[in-house]
Image (cartoon, grey):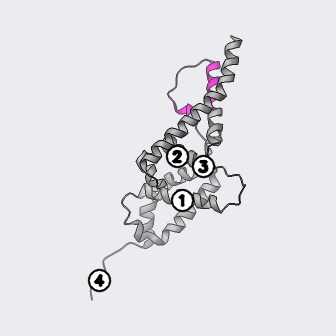
Amino acid sequence: MALLPFRQSKSKRFERLVQPHLRALHSFAYRLTGNQHDAEDLVQDVVTKLFPKVDELEQVEELRPWLHRVLYRQFVDGLRKRPAGRETNTSALDRPDQQTSYLDSLPSTELDPMGHADNDRRSTLLQRLIGELQPDQRTLLLLHDSEGWRQEDIADILDVPLGTIKSRLHRVRAQLREKLQSELEPFETRQRGCQ
């Protein structure tokens, strides 16, 4: 009788595959849901859903984008199941206390107090405008501009063609730029009149 070759338990195999990606999955879930509790629940739902499929996981070549795609789809499915009209926060970008703003990530230059106040006002405005975007637009910005994902990987995660990702990203940035300029224009006109 031949001895069976040694094979790790299912839970050890699953842990070996998924553990290196949990921090990134949680970060992505937090950005989608906007709070710690919902992010933990989302990651737990995905992990629970995938545990019985460890054999399939071992066959996946690019596990990181694949796991993010599963998490994103689980998030979208959860949104669809919510009652109509219920407000859902899909981004931590509208919570200044929980998110480093895009403007804060730019290279710093020495500013006077007015310059700092102006940057703070712009940052708050940008966060509000991003919070007003549609969930799919926010997700695209989160993945590309905040998380640093390549457009090819985003296309894979969201399961849409690369050209669609490029055009949507261009469109949402143009939309944000236009809204930001229109919101800032009256303030900057007033500020110039005071000088």
Residue visible at 49% across and 67% down?
Answer: 50
Q: What element carries label 1?
A: helix
Comes first in the chain, label 4 or label 3:
4
Residue 163 drawn at (x, y percent) = 43, 46
Residue 148 visible, this angle: no
Magenta region's main secondary structure? helix
Comes first in the chain, label 2 or label 4:
4
Q: In which quarter of the image is the N terminus?
A: bottom left
Residue at the left extreme, as displayed:
2
Q: In which quarter of the image is the C terminus?
A: top right
Residue 13 drawn at (x, y percent) = 41, 68
Q: Mark 2 points at which residue?
A: 140
Comes first in the chain, label 2 or label 1:
1
Q: What element carries label 4?
A: loop
Instruction: Find out whether residue 24 is within the magenta segment.
Output: no
- Check contact, mark 3 vs mark 1: CB within 8 A: no
Q: Name the residue under label 3.
A: 135
Res. 73 mark: 1
Residue 133: image quadrant is: top right
Res. 3 mark: 4
**Residue stretch rendered in magenta on the structure:** 101-124
Residue 145 versus residue 21: which sits nearer the camera? Answer: 145
